[in-house]
Image: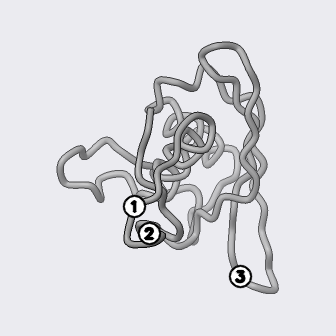
Amino acid sequence: MRAPKLVDGDLVFENNEWIFVEGDEELAQSVEDVLQTRKGEFFLEAEHGLSYDHLLGKRADQAEARDDIIEAISQENRIQSVTDVRIIDDKGKRNRSVSLALEKEDGTKMALREVPVDAG
């Protein structure tokens, strides 16, 4: 697939032209979008996104959060399985991110490092 490139949620332009991504870069961008969208936030597709109930706040539970992350990533049909989820806390900066090891539908591996999940 091919999609407009996004950086911090903004479209990227160079020389008054949209920049596009494809292949693994586009797939990574798509997975990041799922993880950075709160479930129910996108009014056209209420099931799109990640439930933050166990990821942030007083009810944070890393085991439940891992399950929620795997469930959210399953929305991306090009990902066959999630082989590893690491939740990373930077207490000094007070932020949380996730690093993932994924297996694509063609059997190849893919890694995403430190996707922010605390700004949603």
Query: Percent position (x, y) of residue 31?
Result: 54, 44
Disc 3 marks a residue whose amino acid type is Arg
Residue 92 in the image, given as x and y percentages of width and height: 81, 86
Which of the image's four quarters has the N terminus?
top left
Answer above or below: position of 73 versus 41.
above
Q: Secondary structure at mark 3?
A: loop
**What whole-number distance in Å separates the C-alpha atoms at marks 2 and 1?**
5 Å
Q: Are dots 2 and 3 in contact, CB under 8 Å?
A: no
- Which residue is drawn at the image coordinates 80% and 75% (left, top)? 90
| Disc number for residue 68 | none
Dot 2 crowding, Cα within 10 Å, few <14, some 14–19, many 20+ = few
Pick out the residue farthest to the front: 15
- Front one among 115 and 62: 115
- Residue 18 is left or right of residue 86, and the answer is left
Name the image quarter holding residue 107.
top right
Give residue 13's mark: 2
Q: Amino acid at mark 2?
A: Phe
Crowd around label 3: few <14 · some 14–19 · many ≥20 (10 Å): few
SS for tag 2? strand
The residues tagged by marks 1 and 3 sit, at their Cα atoms, a distance apart of: 34 Å
Q: Earlier in the sequence, mark 2 or mark 3?
A: 2
Mark drawn on residue 94: 3
Q: Is residue 68 above or below residue 10?
A: above
The percent position of residue 99, horizontal first and vertical second, equals: 75, 50
- Residue at (37, 51) in percent of width and height: 39
Q: Is residue 16 above or below residue 92?
A: above
Which callout, 1 or 3, points to the residue nearer the camera?
1
Q: Which residue is mark 1?
A: 18
